[in-house]
Amino acid sequence: MEIELYNLNIERAVLSSILFESSYYNEAAERLNARDFYLPAHQAIFTVMGTLSLENVPIDQEFLKIRLTKENQYNEDAILDILATTPLSNTYAYIGEIKELATKRNMISLTTEIKRVIYEEQQGADAAIDSVQKRLFEIGVDSSSKQFRGGKEIVASALDRIKVAKERGNKLIIGLDTGFHGLNKMTNGFNNGDMIVLGARPSMGKTAFAMNLAEKILKGGNGVAIFSLEMSAEDLMLRLLSSTTSVSMGRIKTGDLSDEEWGRISTAADYYAHSHIFIDDDPSLTVNKMRSRLRRLKMQHSEIKFAIIDYIGLMGDQSRIETNRQQQISDISRGIKILARELDIPILVLCQLNRGLENREEKRPKLADIRESGSIEQDADIVMFVHREDVYKAKEEKENKKKAQKEGKDYRSEFKEKPEEEAEIIIEKHRNGATGTIKMIFQKAFTRFVDAEISRAEPIYYKDTNIQIEVKGAQMPPI
């Protein structure tokens, strides 16, 4: 038996109540829009009620008739039916029922939209899934209601925020705590809805810095989603374990561990096994797949507060081979920015920089060095670069030594590679704040960046967690 997904009596009762007491319109408008009414005449009436409310004109029969007649939407029978319905003393439950039925109708109509997308528009499977999931997400958001909150509740929540800020010892943070003092000071934390671009030449440590951010954000009790197109989930996890425990990557990879180091690794592994980290290491990731998967993950795990894409230059869509690469990157960049706003989380996007900067004397990156598309710079709320001068010095020394050997000359280098190198995080664009350079130290053995004022990082031990890890397409590395 098919259930009717509308109730005209309830719609008439709510509209009648508004005509009887116009203040009820505000209660209805907070949760409903005109499309939530099933009958087109009711949609038109509710729309005009909104217009009258904005103009501070009485919402009554006469003004409704004048405005609806002017717009050629006056339906006398519908008005008479509404006037003949007894007004409600409490409209809250009835408004909720209208919204409930409208949501169900939207879900039914989505099935028709799925057929249209597949048969008429002939979209690829990934594009079709992305389109459908976006519509489903919109229905879910539209069906949720957020009511006014009283002063007592708001004050308690505000005081809780102050307590959290006090515990952090940093009053400047208003967004997501990055875990780095210098970065927090410059950005006030990452804001929800922001697209943050992190650029660097190869071997500068952009993936390492992104994983350090993930580590610190996880430590704050938040969830992190990572899309890794270049490295496997296992490799990323090994980096996290090294950075967290201060056990070098070399020793972890070879398994050459003391009992004490093994204990630290085991403790950190247990922490990450119960943390809100999700890794997708699909190397053929497209923007449609990414948006679809991140939307679904966010719906399933509301604790996700940060996402990382490593890196944008490897994303593509083989079904759009006719599109030039610059336009494709522009579309991907715009899609990521829209998704950050839609999910209300900051998304960190890693990108490669043009090779040309290595040929100039001043090798600190600039906005013009971003590879393939100026739209990345345009869409980004923050653009920052990783720069380590010693990387270029080491490369130059190797080239000089090779050249000398080729010419049969002796070459003695005065350059010595250091276990800890000076590094810079250069904020070149900040839509809502300051730009500048943040001094860092890069600890090579642990692929770890630390604030410059910290001489060394102590091993971090994590206990008493009750949250869960999911590694997509891979298994945890053997312990």
Image: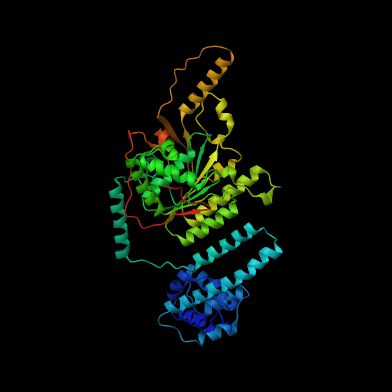
**In the image, residue 99 above or below residue 196:** below
**In the image, residue 453 above or below residue 158:** above
Query: Which residue is rendered at x = 53% and y = 36% of the image?
Result: 367
Query: Which residue is rendered at x = 36% and y = 42% of the image?
Result: 245
Regarding residue 189, the answer to whether it shows in the image is no
Q: Position of residue 127 (x, y in %)?
A: 63, 57
Q: Position of residue 326 (x, y in %)?
A: 64, 42
Report the colour scheme. rainbow
Nearer to the camera, 474 or 340: 474
**In the image, residue 421 above or below residue 233:** above
Q: Position of residue 440 (x, y in %)?
A: 39, 34
Q: Position of residue 379 (x, y in %)?
A: 54, 46
Nearer to the camera, 233 or 93: 233
Query: Which residue is rendered at x = 32% and y = 39% of the image?
Result: 458
Q: Residue furthest top?
A: 409
Query: Which residue is rendered at x = 55% and y = 86% of the image?
Result: 80
Nearer to the camera, 177 or 388: 388
Q: How many marks?
A: 0
Report the side of 330 relative to 17 (left or right): right
Regarding residue 62, the answer to whether it shows in the image is yes
The image quarter in which residue 120 lies: bottom right
